[in-house]
Image (spheres, helix red, strand yellow):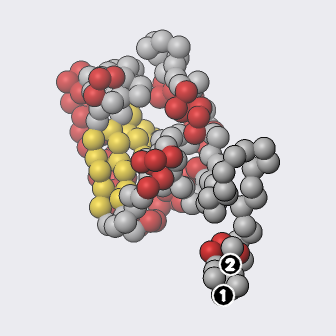
């Protein structure tokens, strides 16, 4: 793009190539760059959702049977484990899950309740040491109507937050920019968890 004086402006001036006009489409090019994230459609479309609410279909029941790397598990306890959220709200989003396939918080044993709380505290310490967030969202969505994606297996969200981490992408594009791949985050968190 050029301004009225013939000077380059916008994307071209910063070294980013100008967007190409879509052949055969009406109108003028809008000058916007596109961040394509087609992998998000798997989550939005529900292809990875369990076929039913049984333990055999539950991703939180299946994860502990895999290696830590393949299951995205950061730490294992006696009654609970910490696992990366496959579809994180923010980078480093952890879930604390009981091994037992139980849906309701009131159904946890005393031992599970205590270890879940301790794992949540340790998760916060680990994330602070590795990523230095400014705050956290902690919570459980109890039931599908309350927003639980996997309602049949209780899980505590530990979501790191940074000042200014909310932007337009999730609002208008159902897209979240994540600067690290899960394998790298899992390795960093696992190392710090056991430090």
Density class for disc 2 (Cα within 10 Å; few <14, some 14-19, many ≥20) is few
- On screen, residue 12 versus residue 44, left or right, reads right
Residue 156 circle label: none
Front residue of this view, candidates 98 and 88: 88
Q: Which residue is mark 2?
A: 2
**Residue at label 1?**
5
Q: Which of the 4 quarters of the picture holds residue 76? A: top left
Q: Please indicate whether residue 91 sits to the left or right of residue 117 in the image.
A: right
Q: Residue at x 71, y 61 (%)?
A: 19
Would you say the residues marked 1 and 2 are in contact, meaning their CB atoms lie under 8 Å apart? yes
**CA gap, disc 1 and disc 2:** 7 Å
Residue 102 versus residue 4 in the image, above or below = above
- Compare residues 101 and 27 and report the one nearer the observer: 27
In the foreground, 3 or 12: 3
Residue 55's place in the image compared with 96, above or below, is above
Q: Is residue 4 visible?
A: yes
């Amino acid at each position: 793009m050029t301004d009225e004086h013939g000077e380059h402006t916008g994307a071209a001036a910063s070294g980013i190539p100008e967007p190409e006009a879509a052949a055969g489409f009406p109108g003028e090019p809008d000058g916007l760059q596109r961040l394509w994230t087609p992998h998000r459609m798997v989550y939005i479309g529900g292809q990875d959702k369990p076929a039913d609410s049984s333990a055999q279909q539950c991703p939180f029941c299946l994860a502990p049977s895999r290696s830590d790397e393949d299951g995205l598990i950061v730490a294992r306890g006696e009654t609970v484990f910490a696992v990366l959220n496959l579809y994180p709200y923010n980078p480093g989003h952890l879930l604390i899950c009981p091994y037992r396939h139980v849906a309701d918080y009131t159904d946890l044993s005393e031992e599970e309740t205590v270890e879940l709380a301790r794992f949540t505290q340790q998760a916060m310490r680990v994330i602070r040491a590795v990523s230095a967030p400014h705050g956290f969202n902690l919570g459980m969505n109890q039931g599908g109507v309350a927003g639980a994606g996997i309602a049949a297996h209780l899980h505590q969200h530990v979501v790191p937050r940074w000042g200014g981490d909310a932007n337009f992408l999730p609002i208008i594009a159902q897209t979240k920019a994540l600067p690290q791949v899960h394998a790298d985050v899992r390795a960093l968190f696992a190392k710090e968890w056991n430090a």
